[in-house]
Image (cartoon, rainbow, N blue to C red):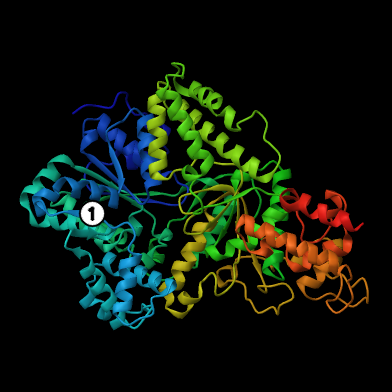
Amino acid sequence: MTPAPHSVNLEDLDPDQRAAALAPRGPVAILAGAGTGKTRTITYRIAHLIDQGLASPNRVLAVTFTRRAASEMRHRLQTMGVGGVQAQTFHSAALRQLRYFWPQIAGDLPWRMLDNKFALVARATRGAGLDASTETVRDLISEVEWAKARLISPDQYAESLGQRTPPQAADKVAEVYRRYEQAKNTPEGFLLDFDDLLLHTAGALENSIGIAEEFREQYRTFVVDEYQDVTPLQQRVLDAWLGQRDDLTVVGDANQTIYSFTGATPDYLLNFSRKYPHAAVVKLQRNYRSTTHITNFANTVIGKATGRVAGTRLTLQGMRQGGAEPEFRTYDSEPEEARGVAQEIKKLQHKGVELKDIAVLYRMNSQSEAFEQALAEAGIVYQVRGGEKFFERPEVREAMARIIRAQQQGAVPAVRGADLGGVVRNILAPVGLDSQEPEGARARERWQALRALVDLVEELGRATPDLDFEGMLAALRERASAQVPPTMQGVTLASLHAAKGLEWDAVFLVGLVEGTLPITHAIKADDEAIEEERRLFYVGVTRAREHLFCTWSKARQEGAKATRKRTRFLDGLMPEPTPSTELTQPDRTRRRRTCRICGEPLLSPAEKTMGRCEDCPGGNEEVFEALRTWRAGVAKDIQAPAYIVFTDATLHAIAEALPSTPEELLAISGVGQVKVQRFGQGVLEITTQFL
């Protein structure tokens, strides 16, 4: 076997990490708590096995939960001088294998990937006599995927539900499932969805001795990350890969089991020592990510867990001193909560925390809207994780095309490593990458994307000093394929599920109310569903390095009745809540302001924006109508609802104030810096006509 180019220095690891890296070949379970360096540990383990001649790089298959994690593992191994290791997701590994073995399975019978199953499931839904609305079809797609991940056939579906509540009557779901599977067998060949890749790969290895022998000769050492979230279908594939062998390392944390809704189960991690009685089990509990204040709070959160996972918990040992205690905020309404979070972010900025190191995390994607609006009005740049993908942004596509064209034309100097960043910066200068960040939200966003691309090139060059221009392009293409974006300046907005595996200096866990976290359908289900929501909260807490804010609101809309209850997961874990009225007295007075005409209290959001009761005369209807006409045109141009530009209440306030300068416009409630930059000129052109 070929050893790694240079020996692995295990002194870089702590005692527990070193024990995991040095564990002998054979079954090994690494129980790794949040922030304990699990990726570092398993890459060192792989490198050590190769360095000692116990494994060959091209005989190792490392399986990760996401393409991003696979890309990161390959990158880390390469920086250690270890190349050739296959690091892939279950699906990408199965796709590669199936393409290779298909002729032995089915001869020349054609097949192709079904990238989007919506149309077929919609047709099956109509065939089963159900309404094929978008929402219904999406629910049924999720249900079919859950059943396949659990190795449940259409005939077994109804009897396998247990406590699970199906989106439609069980017999109807089974019929949709059955019709969908039948529809994939076309006269032109098979259509295979992502779950079929795993089913056919497992079937090929289980049913063909020749295929199994050829595969097992190629891959002899296996590593599986995030093992707590493996599905029965994925475990079947893993068992088929292994055969009777046990050269397997699994890494996971049952406390972070948050994907049961997809069919995942922690049972395989929990039962690993039963399946392999001679397995080595190592716990990683030293947390290097978060301060002790945050790790102590996280331990308290998960310490209240019950059920099958509770007995296996890891206790995090915070290795970072200092930092602030977690803070708690309650607000009267969701918009006030969003504005309050924006104010806290401003304070963090003043303390030197960069926007890219701040995240706002929520349970449901629909919660992002209020925070997007509040951040925009506060002039805070943000990015929504799961929104537009970095490498698909127009400016990034244009930048990549220019970089490729420069290489094709031979217009790049022969430099390597970090010096590549300067070359790329020069190539992108003509498309807006100046030395100074520009004014204006859109121009600034474009500039930051280009700057992030250059920073990524420099990062790749520093990691691989002999990296040339062609190698840099290959690395960028791999990043784009794996959807691994560079870090951009701006606050991250993300769901708690999307935040798994990420970390920030400051984290805001928002919308912490009953019915949202835990979510309503979990409350209606059973205790285990509630416990998964608790683990989701725990995952959110452990994303924070130094600052943690937990916030919630009593009502959805301003002026609405306070009917919301704070999440049960904070019961007994915090001091009495600090209400939004803890803000300074001037702020409280401002929120309770009275009508400037009749003196009565202002109750609704619209009244507070206008500064008067809705029934009191406001005047300037001509200005208001002119502004409405202008707004309609702008909304059409940007393809957005009219209220995204300005609400009617804000237009009334503008019409009555008749601002003549950006500063006067900014002083009006509902008008933030970003909106002044985007729409201020158009507004002032109208208002100044009536002065």
Quick check: can you spot residue 600?
A: yes
Q: Residue at x 35, y 81 (%)?
A: 130
Q: Residue at x 49, y 58 (%)?
A: 539
Quick check: can you spot residue 363?
A: no
Left or right of residue 613: residue 677: left
Check the image and report above or below for 30 versus 609: above
Left or right of residue 237: residue 297: right
Query: Which residue is disc 1 drawn over?
Result: 112
Check the image and report above or below for 171 versus 555: below
Q: Residue furthest top?
A: 414
Count of numbered marks: 1
Of residues 536 and 286, the one drawn nearer to the viewer in this rendering? 536
Of residues 174 and 411, the one drawn nearer to the viewer in this rendering? 411
Q: Position of residue 87 (x, y in %)?
A: 31, 42
Element marked by disc 1: strand
Q: Residue furthest left?
A: 209
